Structure formats: C-alpha cells, structure tokens
Amino acid sequence: MHASDHKALLLSDDEEELCISCHKDQLKLDREYVHDPVDLGMCTICHSPHAAEQEKLLTEDKMDLCLSCHEELSLGLDNAENVHLPADEDCGLCHEIHASDHPSQLLDAAPQLCFECHDDIQTKTELSIGHTAVTSKAGCLNCHTAHHSPHAAMLNGRQSEICLTCHKDALPGKNKKTIASMDDWLHLEFQHGPIQEGNCSSCHDLHGTDVNSILRASYTERFYSSWDPLNFALCFRCHEVSAFLDQRSETLTEFRNGDLNLHFSHVNREHKGRTCRACHETRASASPHHLAESVPFGAWRMPLEYEHLKNGGFCSPGCHSPREYNRVDPVKYEDKKTVKDEDKKKILPPAEDGE
C-alpha cells in the first residue's frame, strides 16, 4: 500500500498473476481450449479492475464486448435474415468465456449442447431410426450454423445441397441395405415435386423418426397391401385420398378408362392391393407421372413398359397382360384394340374390382 517496484503500487506487473491469485477457479486454465485474452493474461481487455456498471466488472455490455473483437460475426448478425436466439442475446448461453474442454469454448459438444434447448429434437434422435448426421461428429453443425444464416432453420446452405454432401453417392444402410445415390435421380426429366423444390424434409424428418427411411409418415415397403389409407399416410400428406375411394369418377384422377377409376382398381382391394411403389418412383423418373421403368418384386426387377398416349396410356408390365386405357374413348375387351400392330398384342380390359 505504501511502496512498490511496480507501477500503480501493484504487487506485480504480471496481470495474469495478480488475477489468478484470487480467480484461479473461475479462469479454469487447466481446460484444453482457453480464450486468447485469458491465455495471454490480459484480463483487463474485458474487465475493469476496480468498478463498472456491468456485472462481473465488464467494461461494457456483454454482447458489445464480444462483438468488439469478433467483428466478422458482428457484421453477419447485422445483415443476417435469420439469427440464432443465443447469438442475439448472450454468447455465454453456448460458450465458456474463459476456457472449455470443447472446441470454440463451447459449454458442451454438439448435439448435447443443442439439446439443452431443443429437447424435442433430442426425442426424435432417440427414436428407433435416428439420422446419423445428428449423432455423428459435429452433430447439429453438420447441417446448421450456430450464429446466423440466410436460410430457414439456420441451415448452413440450401437444404438439397446439404443433403447431397452425404447422399450424392450410395451409402450403406441398415440390415445390409443400400441407401440410394440421389445423384442418380437428379438428371431424370420427371421429378417429384419435393425433389424439384429441393425440399427433402417434405417427406423425411431429418432428425429422426420411427418410420423406415426416416420418413414423416408411413409409406409401406411392400408391393402388395390391403387397402388402408394409413399405409399411404406419407403420400396423403400432399395427394388427395379421395382419388382412391370412388370406383367411378370423371374428375378425381387422370388414370381412368372412361369413368373407371384405375387408381381405385389397383389400390383399393382387400387382398393384394398394389401399393404406390408398385408403379411409381418416389423421387424421379424418365416417364410421365413418375412411373417406374421397373419395380422390385422379390428378387426380380419387374418391368412396366408404360407408354404415354394422348388420352390415356398403354402398359405392358410383368404383373398382367398388356392393357390400354383411354379417358375419352374407353377401351373394351370386345373391341380387341391393339396399340402396335407389330406387337400383335391384344389389349385386355382394365382390372375390375376383385379381378
């Protein structure tokens, strides 16, 4: 108090040494990741040694103080369309200010840190089918940015671009199955609406679900199924279930022979109803209406051989004999119509209910 070898009568010129003499436990210097000002012993960069209007003797408001050094982050927050709430309120909600055992001085590693607020997402990841993007290294940060983003849901890019960072190539799935390469579908002409929009989350719950392929609702993997709208719950999130309820209609669907609703005939059966995947590709196709070139039937890839016609179509699949349908001039068996003379194929009537 009376005299010293150091300026301002300090006990030492070493700022860190002075602060540590009282605040060793708060500084946590034994942690792996130490904030640069702390590591350099420059406590007064952030704290006033005697008095301050801010709590913990900070030299200015906590957020202003952090952003005074992190200028690039400050600029991003000022111009961002979407800002993560903690980044707008208090850096200390996610970061240890002095030192941490986690990179970027986080309070915990992702996704556990994120789950502190997003417990609904944690619940999804703990379901029977969780998305490995959430639970793998970097966790939520594989897809999301922590501070600000021009994209909804704090995504670090367009949704389709993020998904393709993993799903451009085929991946090994569970039970010796392979997750298809999405790159194989994107060059095809007729793309399903969600694919056109780059909206993978329209069909998939990207965090986790108890439905196969982390789908948002049931979509049976079987070729045959008895009629139950719940088996097609995913499809009916967008498509009207009414197209499969009436045997005859002139408005519910374009897939009809006259007024005979061929969606009804194929699907609405107590036994061996065809599921959506019996005819359609869910992602994209080279044929109109997302019709598949071939579909899995046991170990066989069964061809459909569909041909689009002016008022209908012609189908020569492996599951039944060649048939034509026409919305304007209904095809009848007794007409013995043929589509291609060189094929000499008799066109049989569309399958009636119970056939």
Image (cartoon, helix red, strand yellow):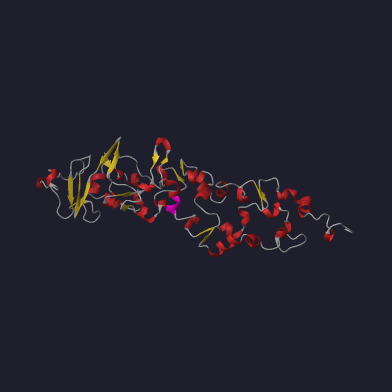
Q: Can residue 171 be seen in this view?
A: yes
Q: Which span is picked out in magenta?
A: 159-163
Is 168 on the left or on the right of 58, as rendered? left
Q: Which of 322 and 30 is in front in this view?
A: 30
Is 56 on the left or on the right of 164, as rendered? right
Residue lying at 45% horizontally and 49% vertically, measured from the top left: 165
On-image quarter of the C terminus = top left
Q: Is residue 345 visible?
A: no
Does 274 appear above or below 117? above
Residue lying at 73% horizontally and 48% vertically, measured from the top left: 25
Q: From the top left corner, tell me how far across and down residue 223 is, in percent.
A: 30, 40
Q: Nearer the viewer, residue 51 or 243?
A: 51
Q: From the top left corner, tell me how far across and down residue 15 is, in percent.
A: 77, 55
Q: Nearer the viewer, residue 27 or 32?
A: 32
State yes or no: residue 161 in magenta: yes
Which secondary structure class fits the magenta region best?
Answer: helix
State yes or no: residue 242 in magenta: no
Q: From the top left corner, tell me how far across and down residue 278 is, in percent.
A: 28, 43
